Image: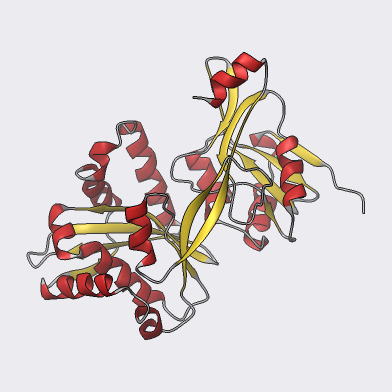
Amino acid sequence: MQKQEIGFLLHDQIDKDLWDKCIKNAFNGMAYAESWYLDIVSPGWCALVQGNYNRVMPLPVKRKYGINYIIQPLFTQQLGVFSIQQMDSSVIEDFLIAIPSKYLFTHINLNTHNHLLNPLCNNLNHELDLIENYDEIKSRYSENLKRNIKKAEKASLTAVKHVRPEEVIRLFRNDRGKEVKSWGEEQYRLLQKLLYTGMHKNRMDTYGVLSSRNEIIAAAVFLKSRKSLVFLFSGNSDEGKKTGAMPFLIDKYIEDHAEMHLILDFEGSNNENLARFYRSFGSSPIYYPEYKSARGPKVFQQFLLNR
């Protein structure tokens, strides 16, 4: 069978209805690749499209210092090729080759179902199938996790829904955010816009944990799609860490969504401590490939690849 041509589309040439239909029906569809999400995290994104939007690949394009390049957007763990039909590594290679030559540098994460023969590396993710009932899922929690949940219950913590995005961001900024030097007000405004848009579309859940004094000490945002729930963003406090607030929060979220045909995607992590925490819920390791390439003179390529 003759291969269908892969076409390049500028942002204003993309039929977003057909695009979103493909992502919705794709066997590997993800919320990150829906048009509303991309419009926020990568304004002006372009695309590669095969057939009548049977296979698509978003290109999060940017331009700086006169150089056109493609880079993974913030708050977007995986992108790559999405397809209604199954595909092998040759299809992924065809799409990567089809990236226009004007983009001199590409550094992106493909998705779990995009298999490359020679990826830059394979990043670690963790997923938990929620199809079983809550008691069966909880029976596979680690003993340490069960102790932390009991600690939270003993501290009289309470899980609540519909926490304002500002509260989640505040908790993050006062904790882990202090270590993320590359984030400024622009990045936090982008995050707030993303969270509010997702909530307006009923595509995000926000959960929080109240202390015995009714103060929010931990909070998290989950991105919802037809197939998965993504642990997108969270914030914790010193008190939250001491009382097991985050394990308590995730456990409540699992309890609320057990016996559903959904996957809880923990969105990481290569960090061993976080990976151990996600494994403690009985999740399974999943890998997704990282891709990096550069065009132009050899010296220029080396400069870009080493950045």
Question: Residue 72, position in %: x, y?
Answer: 52, 38
In front of the other: 93 or 159: 93
Please indicate, yes or no, whether residue 30 appears anywhere in the rendered image: yes
Residue drawn at point x = 38 percent, y = 82 percent: 134
Question: Residue 229, position in %: x, y?
Answer: 45, 64
Q: Is residue 177 above or below residue 301?
A: below
Residue drawn at point x = 51 percent, y = 48 percent: 37
Q: Is 10 situated left or right of 60 in this image?
A: right
Please indicate, yes or no, whether residue 216 appears anywhere in the rendered image: no
Q: Is 242 situated left or right of 200 in this image?
A: left
Q: Quadrant of residue 221?
A: bottom left
Q: Is residue 90 above or below residue 120?
A: below
In front of the other: 121 or 217: 121
Q: Is 293 situated left or right of 260 in this image?
A: right
In front of the other: 129 or 211: 129
In the rendered view of the protein, which quadrant contains the N terminus? bottom right
Outermost residue toward the right? Answer: 1
Q: Quadrant of residue 248?
A: bottom left
Q: Is 6 situated left or right of 157 in this image?
A: right
Q: How is the image coloured?
A: secondary structure
Q: Is residue 18 above or below residue 205?
A: above
Residue drawn at point x = 27 percent, y = 66 percent: 247
Q: Is residue 128 above or below residue 236?
A: below
In front of the other: 299 or 65: 299
Question: Residue 109, position in %: x, y?
Answer: 55, 44
Outermost residue toward the left? Answer: 213
Question: Residue 83, position in %: x, y?
Answer: 70, 56
Tag count: 0
Residue drawn at point x = 14 percent, y = 60 percent: 242
